Amino acid sequence: MSDTEAGDALVELTRLEAQVTELKGRVAAHADEQQVGQDRGAASTAAWLAHETKQTRPAMHRMVRLGQDLQRHPLTREALAAAVICPEQAAVILRWVDTIPDEHHDTAERHLLDLAAEHDAKALNRLGKRLWEVIDPDGADAREAEILERQEQAAARAMYLKVWDDGDGSTCGAFKMPHLGGAALRKILAAVMAAKHQNATKGAGTGHLTADSTGPEAQGQAFYELLMRFPKNKLPKLGGLNATLLVTISEESLLGRLEQSGTILDTGDRISPALARQLACEAGILPVVMNGKSEVLDLGREQRLHSKAQRIAIAIKQQGQCATEGCDRTNGLHAHHVVEWSKGGPTDLANAIGLCHWHHMRAHDTGYDMNHHPSGSVTFHRRQ
């Protein structure tokens, strides 16, 4: 095909896709009414269809729900069937029309369909927030305030952050937060990417704005820099310590005499000696086998709570792991007296183990026995 023919074909395929989406939704809604799949023991039509077509259940549930929504809004269904709007626009229209009382549906639906002739789904979604200006101009501001408050409350309840390793040296993540938090994050990243900051941290001439310096890669680099440079004294304490990243590495490797990887105690992840040396250049070094200034690690009976130095020593001794057998928790270990301080136990390393919050609670729970083993680990058993 020529470039013109290829372009025309893509436009036509997009229109066909809209028509097929409407037809699939309509048939799926009808099949749901007929309880298709019930005779085969399926929990729903969507579950049956997902099994038959090897698609995911959420995708099939969305198809059935789309068909049901289109049945309730025939104007949008007809527009989608005629390929006047695309599936994304239809979803936006249905979403916003359903936020207003039934008696105003026709007016709102016609208004959004008119706007869809000139605006894509993203712009249409933004305009949908102003529907009340068309339906009730005098009360639009109050309605908008009500909608915004409801959205903010829902967004606060729906917040999440997921972080996982991809097994290839990178960490991936996804998050959801209220719009205000997103706006603040974009502002902070913009400041880190700004020419003035880049010149100050990387040298003159590096801070010039291009598409590459403001795109996703640059934002990712700015986010990483934000995490690595965040002042530790501004962070809350975790297990009695500021959010300290403990990395162990031999002196020979640190000085470049031996290429040996380091270990992040909290996670057990390995890092290259080059990265460990880079961290050493940018952060303080606390020697564990010390040739310089040492810190007292045994406090006897003079102090009840373990010191920061002791907590670091406990984390290093246990390789960042909870002392309980079978427990893989690493974050925020609590320093626990093996012989309780109230019963005469000293605050020293010989009488200390690191426990995660949950197992530390079990250690003080009279409903459990804690058994100590020669390896330094502990186990818990519910008392009979």
Image (spheres, rainbow, N blue to C red):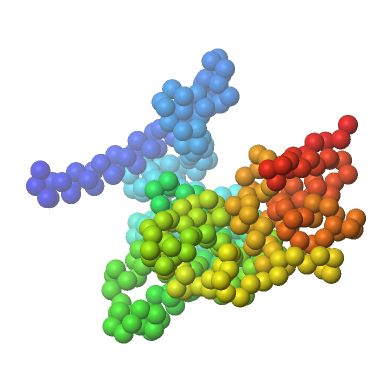
Q: Give 236 or 380, whichever is nearer the viewer.
A: 380
Question: Would residue 303 appear left or right of 60 to someone viewing this image?
Answer: right
Question: Is residue 198 placed above or below 317 in the rendered structure?
Answer: below
Q: Position of residue 44 (x, y in %)?
A: 56, 26
Q: Give 320 or 345, whichever is nearer the viewer.
A: 345
Screen quadrant of the C terminus? top right
Question: Would residue 320 appear left or right of 111 to someone viewing this image?
Answer: right
Q: Residue at x 38, y 65 (%)?
A: 256
Question: Is residue 297 placed above or below 330 in the rendered structure?
Answer: below
Residue 25 falls in image quadrant: top left
Q: Position of residue 45 (x, y in %)?
A: 52, 26
Q: Position of residue 291 (x, y in %)?
A: 56, 71
What is the count of numbered marks? 0
Q: Residue at x 57, y 74 (%)?
A: 292
Q: Position of residue 349 (x, y in %)?
A: 73, 59
Residue 100 seen anywhere in this rendered image of the structure: no
Q: Give 56 or 14, whichever is nearer the viewer.
A: 56
Question: Would residue 53 appear left or right of 176 to someone viewing this image?
Answer: left
Q: Residue at x 48, y 60 (%)?
A: 250
Outermost residue to the top: 39
Outermost residue to the front: 291
Q: Give 340 or 93, whichever is nearer the viewer.
A: 340
Q: Residue at x 82, y 68 (%)?
A: 303
Outermost residue to the left: 2
Residue 251 seen anywhere in this rendered image of the structure: yes
Screen quadrant of the N terminus? top left
